[in-house]
Image (tube, rainbow, N blue to C red):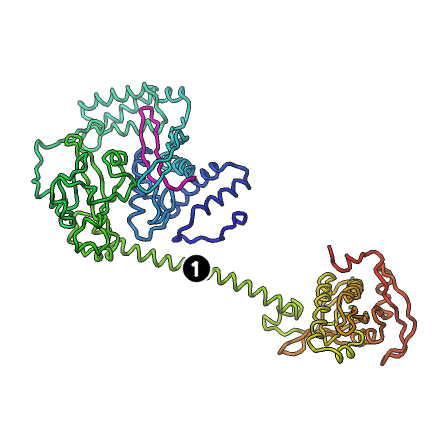
Amino acid sequence: RLQAGVQDSFLTFEVYKDEITMQLVDKACKILGVPADTVLREFGEYFFEFCKRSGYDHMLRTLGGNLYEFIENLDALHSYLSLSYQANTEVLFLFVFPQEMNAPSFRVEKHEDGSMHLHYYSDRRGLCHIVPGIIGAAALDFFNIEISMEIVDQTEEEERTGKKEHIVFLVTQNPAFSYKERNEFSSSPQYLADSEKQIENQLNKEDLEKAKNTVRDRGSSVCPVKKSHWKTIRGIITLGKGKLLRGFDPVYPKSLWIDTKTFCNGLPFHMVFDKELRVKQAGVSIQKIVPGLQTTGVCLDHYFSIVHPEVPFTISSIQKFINSQFVFQTRREMMPESWKQRPMLELRGQMIWMESLQCMLYLCSPLLRTLHELEERQMHIADIAPHDVTRDLILLNQQRLAEMELSNQLERKKEELRVLSKHLEEEKKKTEALLYAMLPQHVANQLKEGKRVEAGEFKECTILFSDVVTFTNICAQCEPIQIVLMLNSMYLRFDRLTTVHDVYKVETIGDAYMVVGGVPVPVPTHAERVANFALGMIIAAKGVQNPVSGNPIQIRVGIHTGPVLAGVVGEKMPRYCLFGDTVNIASRMESHGVPSKIHLSSSAYQCLKYKNFEMTGRGEIEVKGKGRMHTYFLIRNKTATENEIMGRP
C-alpha cells in the first residue's frame, strides 16, 4: 500500500477507481515475485470467504444444486443485487460494483464429458483472473469438488456501451481418485447390493426393475467421485409416491384453460414478440403506460431499450443471454406527454423462447426500488398484480435502504473520528515535544498526572555556564532585532549539541546558557558529556557573527562538578531548577574565564583527568566569594574528531 501510494482506509459504500486495484496488484507482484494472475486468483479465493463472512453464504448456497446450476444462476444474482437497490455498493459475489457501474455477465455451456465453457463479459479489464479463484473456492466449499479453469479464448466484443472483454474459461473437474479405484468402488457386489436394497424399500414392483437396471448400468460406468455416485442413486430414488424422479413427465392440458382477457389481466406486465421484434400481445398495465403497444405489430425496440445485459436489441443477442434477467427501459420520445417529465419506467423479468410459435415471451415486473420511485412515476401499489413480489420488495427495500443509509453515516462518522483521532495524536506529540523541551520527561509526566514533584538530590553532576564576551557593548551598539537574531543563531547551534551529547539544558538568561550532565538522569559519564559539549560550543560559536564587528563572536565557558538539589519551582510556567553551591562555583568559573577558553574547576579536572582529554593548569586565581582556587583550561579531546564532537556524519 505504501509503495502504491494509496490511502490507508476505504469506505464500504464508496466507489473507487480500478486503477487503485491494479496499482496494489502491481506492487504486490513485485514484492512477492509472482505474476499478477496468481495474486488475483488468491484474492478471488479470499474474497469468496469474505462474502461468506459478510452474510451472503446462505444466498450463494441456494443458487443451484451443482456447479453448473450455480454458475448458470450467477448472472441472475448479479442482476438482482446490482439493480435492486439504489445505493448498492455492498459486496456482490464476483465483484464490488455500484449501480452506476456495469456488472459482469456470465454464460455457461455444458458438454457431454462433464466439462463446461464459462463465458465472462466485463468492461473492467485485467480482473478476469479473479474468476477462477472465486469459482474454484465455491466449487470446493459448496460441492466438495476441485476444478481447474484455463483461458481458451480472449477477445473484445463491441457492445452497445462500448468494447467488452470476453473471456472463455474451460472448466474441468479434477479427479478425486484413480480410474481403478473408481471402477472397483462402483462395481463392487456389496455396493450394488446395498444400492438395490435401498431402492427396494421405496419403489413398487414396476419401478423396481427400472431402478435395478439403472444401478447396474451406472455401476459399470465410470463414476467421477464417490459422492457423485451416491447423488446419482439418491436421484433415482422416489420423491413421494413411488414415481421415479428421472422418469417424471409433466402433464399438459389438451387446450389452455385460460382466456386471453384473463391472461392479460392476470399478467399485467408481459409481452410477446417475434423474431422481427414485432409485438404480438402485451399485458394491460404495460398498455396503460405505453399506449403505443395497443397497436399490434409495432416494433418493440421503438418503445424500449435494453438496460441489462448490455447487448444489442436483437433476438439472437437475447437468446445468447436467455438465462439472464432482462431490464427494459421505456424511450422518452415514445411516451405520452404526461410521462415525459417523469423518470422512465424500467421493467425487469425473464425471457422464454417459444419454439412452436417462434416468439419470445417476456414475463416482467416494474423495476421499482422504493416508494419514492413509485410516487415519481405516479403509480400505486394497486398497479402491480397481487401475486407479484415486487409489492413486498418495495416495502422491504425501503427499510433496507434506510438501514444502509444509517450504516453509511456510521461508517463515515467512524472514518471522520479516525482521521480526527490521528490528527489529535499528532497534535499531542507536538505538545509533548514542546513540554519535554521545557521540562524533563519524567517531571512533565508527573505534572500532567497532577502529582507533586518532589525535589531530588544528586550527589555528583557537572554544570556548565557560558556567556558572550562584551555582550553589553554589543547590545549598546545594535538594534534589538539584531541581538535577537544573533542569540537565536547561537542557541540553535547549542541546542543541537545538547542532543548530540545527551546533556540537559537548564535555562538561558540573556546571553547566559546553562546545561548540566547527570541530571535529571544520573550517569557516570556526566563530566565527559559536558566537556565534549563545551568543545562543541567553542567550534559552533565561530559560525555566529558579531553584528557590530562582523567577526565571529567569542564566548567564555565555565565548568564545575559537585552535588546539587533539583526540583520544579512554581505552578505557572514551572521551571526545573538546580540549587546548591555547585551552581555558584560553575557560574564563577564562567565569569572568571578567558574568551574562547573552557575554564575548569579542580573537581571537574579530577573527573576528566584520566578520560582522554588534554588540559592545562591555569594556576591559583582569586574567585569572588570563594577565595583562591586552583583552576584549569580544557584544550581538546584526544580521541574524538571535530565531526564527532559536532555530531556531523
- Which residues lie in the magenta part? 104-126
Query: In the rendering, at what x and y percent does residue 398 appear?
Result: 27, 56
Q: Amino acid at mark 1?
A: Lys
Let me know if residue 247 is in the magenta part: no
89 vs 102, nearest the viewer: 102
Q: In this rendering, does residue 62 appear at all?
A: no
Q: In this rendering, does residue 617 appear at all?
A: yes
Q: Is residue 377 left or right of residue 565?
A: left
Residue in view at x 22 percent, y 40 percent? 350
Quadrant in which residue 138 is drawn: top left
Q: Quadrant of the C terminus?
A: bottom right
How busy is the neighbourhood of tag 1: few (under 14 within 10 Å), some, or many (20 plus)?
A: few
Query: In the rendering, at what x and y percent does residue 631 appear?
Result: 88, 71
Query: In the rendering, at what x and y percent does residue 547 appear?
Result: 75, 73
Residue in view at x 30 percent, y 55 percent? 401
103 vs 115, nearest the viewer: 103
Q: Is residue 444 above or below residue 162?
A: below
| Number of numbered discs on residues | 1
The residue that label 1 is drawn on is: 414
Query: In the rendering, at what x and y percent does residue 465 appear?
Result: 78, 72
Q: Is residue 348 above or below residue 474?
A: above
Is disc 1 placed on a helix, strand or loop?
helix
Quadrant in which residue 131 is drawn: top left
67 vs 615, nearest the viewer: 615
Quadrant in which residue 74 is drawn: top left
